[in-house]
C-alpha cells in the first residue's frame, strides 16, 4: 500500500509541474490573442481551473459526510495559497501588484473570509448560507467577464489606431491552439494533484493522523499544488499578474464556489469543527488582512516579505501537527490562536514602518527641470 501511495505521489507531482508550464504558456498567449489582460485571465480562467481539485475533493467529501475534509480543504488551501504559494513566487522574483487587486479583489477576499467565519460560528454552514455564497460567485464572475469585455473593446480601439498608423495589427490568430494548451494544462494539473493528494492521504492515514489535520495540511497542500506550480512558473516566465491573480482569484473561488456548492448539496449543510472555527478560520482571516497593507504600500511583494510569508506558513503547519499530537490541551490552542493571529498583522505593521522610513529618507528636493527656451 505504501509503495503504491509513494508512486502516485511522485508521478502526480511530475504531472503537476508539467501541467503548470503548459497552462501558463497557453494562458499568457490566449490573453494576448484577445487583448484581455493577464490579470483578468489569472483571476478567472487560471484561478478557477487550478481550484478544480479543491472543488472536486470538497464536493465529494461533503456528499459522503466527511465535513472535516471539506472544510479543512477550503480553509487550509486559502492559508497556503497566500503564505506558501505567494511567498515562494515572490522569492523567485519580486511581484508587482495591480491596482485593481488592491482596490477590489483583495478587499473582497478579506470580506468573504470574514463572512465564512461568521457563518460558521454556530457550527454549520447551512444550505441557505451556501446558496448566498454561490450567488456571490455568480456576481463576481459576471463582473470579471464584463470588465474583460471592456478591456477587449479598448484593445480593439488600439488595434484600429495601429492600422491607421500603418503598424501591423495583432489578431486572435492561433487562439484555438492556445485554448487547447490551457485545457490540457488544467487536465494535467487536476489529475496530477489528485494522485499526489491520494498518495499523501494514504500515507498519513497509515500514520494515524486525524481527518481534519490531514485536510488542513496534506489535502490542502495537495489540492493547492496547481496554484503553486502555476504561480511559480508564471513568476519565472515574468507573467507576474497571472502569478498574483491566480492566488487571489483561487481564494475567492474556494470560499464562494467550493464552500458554497458543498454546503448547498450536503444533506444537512456543512458541519464545521470547533477547532476550525476557533483557530483555522481566524488564521485565514488574518492572512487575508495581512495581504492588503503589504500589497498597497509600494504595489509589490519583495523577496524578504515573501520569506516572511513562507516562514509563517511553516510555523502554522508545524503547529497543526503539534496540536494533532497534543489534542488534550485546549487552553494551549487558544493561547496559540492569539499568538499566530496577531503575529502576521504585526509583521505587516513592521513592513509599513520600514517602507515609510525609506520613503522619508529619499531626497525630496530634486532639481527642477530646465524651463523651455
Image (cartoon, rainbow, N blue to C red):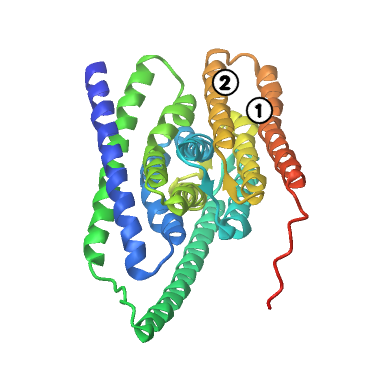
Q: Which residue is nearer to you in this view: 246 or 138?
A: 246
* Residue 318: image location, x then y, percent: 53, 20
* Residue 225: image location, x then y, percent: 38, 37
Badge 1 density bin: few <14, some 14–19, many ≥20, Cα 10 Å: some
Q: Residue at x 31, y 73 (%)?
A: 170
Residue 52 is labelled as: none
Q: Residue at x 43, y 52 (%)?
A: 242
Residue 340 is labelled as: 1
Tag 2's secondary structure?
Answer: helix
* Residue 184: image location, x then y, percent: 23, 51
- Compared to residue 37, the image places residue 236 above or below, namely above
**The N terminus lies in quadrant:** top left
Residue highlighted by disc 2: 319
Q: Find residue 368 and report its image quarter.
A: bottom right
Q: Which residue is nearer to you in this view: 140 or 346?
A: 346
Q: Which residue is nearer to you in this view: 156 or 132?
A: 156
- Looking at the image, is mark 2 or mark 1 earlier in the sequence? 2
Q: Find residue 193 and report its image quarter.
A: top left
Confirm or deny contact between disc 2 and disc 1 (CB under 8 A): yes
Tag 1's secondary structure?
Answer: helix
**For the view shown, which residue lies furthest in the front direction?**
373
Residue 296 appears left or right of 31: right
- Compared to residue 206, the image places residue 271 above or below, namely below
Residue 10 appears left or right of 241: left
**The C terminus lies in quadrant:** bottom right
Amino acid at each position: 500500500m505504501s509503495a503504491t501511495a509513494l508512486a502516485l505521489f511522485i508521478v502526480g507531482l511530475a504531472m503537476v509541474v508539467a501541467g503548470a508550464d503548459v497552462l501558463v504558456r497557453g494562458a499568457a498567449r490566449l490573453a494576448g490573442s484577445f487583448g484581455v489582460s493577464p490579470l483578468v485571465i489569472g483571476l478567472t480562467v487560471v484561478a478557477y481551473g487550478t481550484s478544480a481539485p479543491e472543488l472536486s475533493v470538497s464536493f465529494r467529501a461533503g456528499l459522503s459526510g466527511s465535513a472535516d475534509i471539506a472544510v479543512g480543504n477550503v480553509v487550509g488551501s486559502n492559508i497556503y495559497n497566500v503564505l506558501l504559494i505567494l511567498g515562494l513566487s515572490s522569492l523567485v522574483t519580486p511581484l508587482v501588484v495591480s491596482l485593481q487587486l488592491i482596490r477590489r479583489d483583495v478587499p473582497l477576499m478579506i470580506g468573504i473570509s470574514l463572512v465564512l467565519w461568521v457563518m460558521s460560528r454556530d457550527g454549520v454552514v447551512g444550505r441557505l448560507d451556501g446558496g448566498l455564497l454561490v450567488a456571490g460567485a455568480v456576481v463576481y464572475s459576471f463582473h470579471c467577464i464584463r470588465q474583460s469585455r471592456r478591456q477587449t473593446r479598448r484593445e480593439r480601439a488600439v488595434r484600429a489606431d495601429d492600422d491607421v498608423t500603418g503598424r501591423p495589427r495583432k489578431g486572435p490568430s492561433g487562439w484555438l491552439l492556445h485554448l487547447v494548451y490551457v485545457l490540457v494544462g488544467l487536465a494535467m494539473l487536476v489529475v496530477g494533484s489528485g494522485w499526489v493528494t491520494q498518495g499523501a492521504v494514504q500515507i498519513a492515514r497509515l500514520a494515524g493522523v486525524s481527518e481534519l489535520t490531514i485536510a488542513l495540511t496534506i489535502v490542502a497542500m495537495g489540492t493547492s499544488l496547481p496554484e503553486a506550480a502555476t504561480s511559480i512558473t508564471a513568476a519565472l516566465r515574468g507573467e507576474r499578474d497571472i502569478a498574483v491573480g491566480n492566488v487571489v482569484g483561487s481564494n475567492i473561488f474556494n470560499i464562494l464556489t467550493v464552500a458554497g456548492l458543498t454546503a448547498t448539496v450536503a444533506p444537512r449543510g456543512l458541519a464545521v469543527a470547533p477547532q476550525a472555527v476557533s483557530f483555522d478560520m481566524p488564521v485565514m482571516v488574518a492572512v487575508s488582512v495581512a495581504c492588503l497593507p503589504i500589497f498597497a504600500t509600494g504595489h509589490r511583494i519583495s523577496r524578504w516579505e515573501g520569506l516572511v510569508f513562507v516562514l509563517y506558513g511553516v510555523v502554522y503547519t508545524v503547529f497543526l501537527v503539534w496540536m494533532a499530537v497534543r489534542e488534550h490541551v485546549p487552553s494551549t490552542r487558544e493561547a496559540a490562536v492569539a499568538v499566530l493571529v496577531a503575529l502576521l498583522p504585526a509583521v505587516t505593521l513592521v513592513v509599513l514602518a520600514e517602507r515609510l522610513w525609506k520613503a522619508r529618507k529619499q531626497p525630496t528636493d530634486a532639481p527642477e527641470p530646465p524651463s523651455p527656451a
